[in-house]
Image: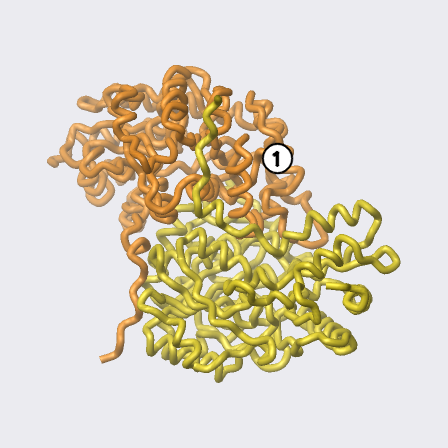
Chain colours: A orange, B yellow
Amino acid sequence: MAKKAPLISQRADTMQASPLRKLAATAEVRKKKGVHVYHLNIGQPDLPTHPDFFKAARAYKPKTIAYAPSTGLEAPREAWSTYYKKSGINFNAEDIIITSGGSEGIIFALEAVCDVGDEVLVFEPFYTNYNSFASLTGVKLKPVTLDIKDGFHLPSDKEIKSKITKRTKAILVCNPSNPTGTIFTKQEMKRLVSIAKQKNLFVLSDEVYREFAFEHKHTSIMDFPEIRQQAIVLDSASKRFNVCGARVGVVASKNKEVMAAVFKMAMARLSVASIDQEALVPMLKDPKKYTKDMVKEFKKRREIVYNGLKKIPGITFSKPEGAFYIIIGLPVKDADHFATWMIKTFHDKKETVLLAPAEGFYATKGKGKQEVRLAFMLKEKDLKRSLELLAMALEKYKG
Amino acid sequence: MAKKAPLISQRADTMQASPLRKLAATAEVRKKKGVHVYHLNIGQPDLPTHPDFFKAARAYKPKTIAYAPSTGLEAPREAWSTYYKKSGINFNAEDIIITSGGSEGIIFALEAVCDVGDEVLVFEPFYTNYNSFASLTGVKLKPVTLDIKDGFHLPSDKEIKSKITKRTKAILVCNPSNPTGTIFTKQEMKRLVSIAKQKNLFVLSDEVYREFAFEHKHTSIMDFPEIRQQAIVLDSASKRFNVCGARVGVVASKNKEVMAAVFKMAMARLSVASIDQEALVPMLKDPKKYTKDMVKEFKKRREIVYNGLKKIPGITFSKPEGAFYIIIGLPVKDADHFATWMIKTFHDKKETVLLAPAEGFYATKGKGKQEVRLAFMLKEKDLKRSLELLAMALEKYKG
């Protein structure tokens, strides 16, 4: 008998496949059967990218498309600093390292502050890829569960502190939050800052949705001078400028040791794509011009979703305060089963909806079983129709 | 007394800074003093990038610059398959995942086949960033030392096998080799294949310099059908098409489990920059058109370096067979000390040379102390002058 090929690693074997893409293949099958599928499952903005991005990309014509400096090209790095200063955050170019999307930045930050087996506090439900980054870096995520009934706001300090052990190195917070749409208030952020100070933890602050704050202003971790040496901002141009395919993010911090560590990792992978770094410069220098209309559009969509959901009996939810997501509780036993049934079987006039079951956003087994996440990536009319379809499906469904 | 900020991780602290960039700051200081510095230290081609790259980049004008599929955009993935087939390697699009440069691909492959603490055989001297990738992934590199007197060709099977332990998961081989310029012959590759078969190891084959083969044809790991299920090709467009700043590479394998694992990692970081993937399509579809002249140019430079070195007394070296590097032995006790002296103090007519001390390419402590790596990134005249300067410096130097 022929010998079998060697086995892949355990960490690769046990790593999650993206829960967001789990039902994508089923959706494709359904589309081929002539059913129109409304995608409420993914966070890829449907709006056009501003032409200035392509203009700047075209204007970048070096003789040789050479490695950029590992920290980022000079003009884009300066432009990121300008962006931060216009957003009330005092990062200089040297506090910033440009990364290949926000994802690479999160990996770098986890590697910089954690050794294998170290722990990081996260608030669940959380951005599902945090799980993958933790697997890749050998870091253990310790979830603090947020309650849908509190609009996914913070539990007591005692509850949070109870999850901190000797191996805890950092608190990872996404604010405004994907997937909940919650914005932690200044008071809540202050509480996290106090805990981090008291326990001597880093705060990894994912502020990708900074501009998408509808109810009250977003509070950056950098608004607290007392935590500056422990704060690492994780960021991305993807959502706010609608350039997901450009893959440009940053890690930024006033802590020189952290930045020196991130620089070493950045050197290992040489550089980030030069054209994409440069293409973002105009947007970074004048951010409001590019984010204003988009924020307005998503604020409008939020109202549509809110009003649509109010009409569906048995749904648990709060009005999202930021980002462009919401997690809702469904009156079903198993939201995954419901979502699968909906995409596989249900239709009204040959139309159905693809949902993202929320279990994948939790680390605690069994949590989120009755919840799904919706992303507001459809135009007004389609959003309304999607919620109508959801209501019909819930009525028809026998779980 | 104020509490100090928390400490960064040990792995970040002990991670190497790039040895290639170690003397870069000193070089900048020297330049400011009006001394011209010839860079023999880095592998960034000085030739212009073909205009077709920029043309294709400009032609890519989607409405929205959206996330590409995690595996890569369809047309570029197909184009990579075309490229491989034209290079005599039968990879279909589904065997290929596009990565952010070759670097990301190496990290993915190490994660896919190794758990933390697992071992990978490498041949030293090796591409220095392998060290960083190993740190990042918790993998232990086990060096098999190659001898400059054998032109850095393979030692005996016995010697190689003596480094294999129960924790060894793979052999990582760079062929043609950065930093040595050596190409393992078909017979040598066959020996590695036999060892990998016998010990049930993966072969991670870094074939970034495939086209730069001057003495005899390059042998791909895919030329051995018997190893196909254990072979993972690591590749990059950077060098062969002179597009280092585009950051496009691939992982390719016929092993479905490996590719499923790499796919999960690719999903976690969402996608690779879309413009850059697309910009490469014309080059991938007609590779010879773009590589031909460059290969010719580097072949010419190799002759210049070879002839220049022959005139310097006391140098140990073999004629490089591929890539565009050479490691040479210097008649000094400490090549790092010599290189530092050369960039800091030495000049002839206000000109000097920046070398890369070879110690950073070895994992075994103390190895390579008398060696430096040269990269052929200068035009004929400048290359000649650099070697003249090296000869003068060696004569003047009191180590």
Q: Where A240 sits versus B280, above or below?
A: above
| Residue at screen point 72% across, 58% down | B354
Q: Where A11 sits versus B230, above or below?
A: above
SS assignment at label 1? helix
Question: How many marks on residues?
Answer: 1
Q: Which of the 4 quarters of the picture holds residue B384?
A: bottom right
Q: Where A82 sits versus A341, above or below?
A: above
Q: Nearer the viewer, residue A41 or B170?
A: B170
Image position, residue A197 (x, y; %) = 41, 24
Residue type (three-letter) at the residue carrying disc 1: Glu
Residue most extreme to the bottom: B187
Q: Nearer the viewer, residue B223 or B109?
A: B109
| Residue at screen point 38% across, 63% down | B119
Q: Is residue A31 visible?
A: no
Q: Nearer the viewer, residue B270 or A91?
A: A91
| Residue at screen point 16% across, 36% down | A334
**To which chain does the residue with label 1 belong?**
A
Image position, residue B208 (x, y; %) = 55, 66
Other-residue count near label 1 (Cα within 10 Å), few / some / many at <14 / 14–19 / ≥20: some
| Residue at screen point 42% across, 54% down | B71
Q: Is residue B302 left or right of residue A243?
A: right
Image position, residue A192 (x, y; %) = 37, 23
Image position, residue A360 (x, y; %) = 27, 39
Q: Which residue has dot 1 on it?
A: A94
Q: Nearer the viewer, residue B196 or B281?
A: B196
